[in-house]
Amino acid sequence: MALGVGRPYWAVVVAASIFQSNLALTWRRALNRVFGNLVGLALLAALLPITHTG
């Protein structure tokens, strides 16, 4: 709240959803999220010029 974040509880929810009791599963989930974000960014970069109408 002191930093001006509107919904600070989201940080706790995200952290809890990433961390699991098994370290290997935690790393796998983190890598999947990074890969998914990179693929999404690539799709956005490819489709934005095509769909941009002005």
Image: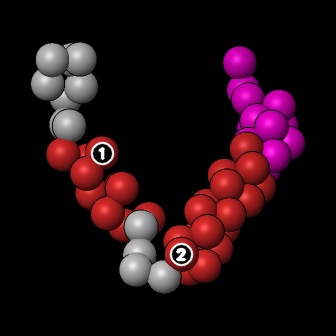
Mark 1: secondary structure: helix
**Quarter of the figure that contains the C terminus:** top right
- Neighbourhood count class around disc 1 (C-alpha, 10 Å): few under 14, some 14–19, many 20 upward: few
24, 7: nearer the viewer: 24
Measured as percent of width and height from the top left, residue 15 is found at 36, 56
Q: Could you say which is closer to the camera, residue 47 or residue 31?
A: 31
Q: Quadrant of the N terminus?
A: top left
Closer to the observer: label 2 or label 1? 2
Specify the amino acid type for callout 2.
Answer: Leu
Q: Quadrant of residue 14?
A: bottom left
Placement of 34 over or under 24, stated as above or below: above
| Rendered position, 23 above or below 33 | below
Q: Is residue 20 above or below residue 2?
A: below
| Residue at image location 61% in from the left, 68% down from the top | 27
Amino acid type of the residue that numbered disc 1 sits on in the rendered structure: Ala
Q: Taking 30 as reference, is 10 above or below it?
A: above
Can you identify the residue that label 2 sits on?
23
Kindly identify the residue that appears in the image at 75 percent across and 50 percent down.
38
Q: Residues within 10 Å of mark 2 (few under 14, many from 20)?
A: few
SS at badge 2: helix
In the picture, measured across the screen, residue 48 lies left or right of residue 7, that is: right
Answer with mark 2 or mark 1, whichever residue precedes in sequence.
Answer: 1
Q: CA distance from mark 2 to mark 1?
A: 20 Å
Which residues are the magenta region?
Answer: 42-54
Q: Position of residue 16 (x, y in %)?
A: 31, 63
Q: Which residue is mark 1?
A: 11
Residue 8 percent location from the top left of the image = 20, 37
- Tell me which corner region of the image, top left, top right, bottom left or bottom right, holds residue 53: top right
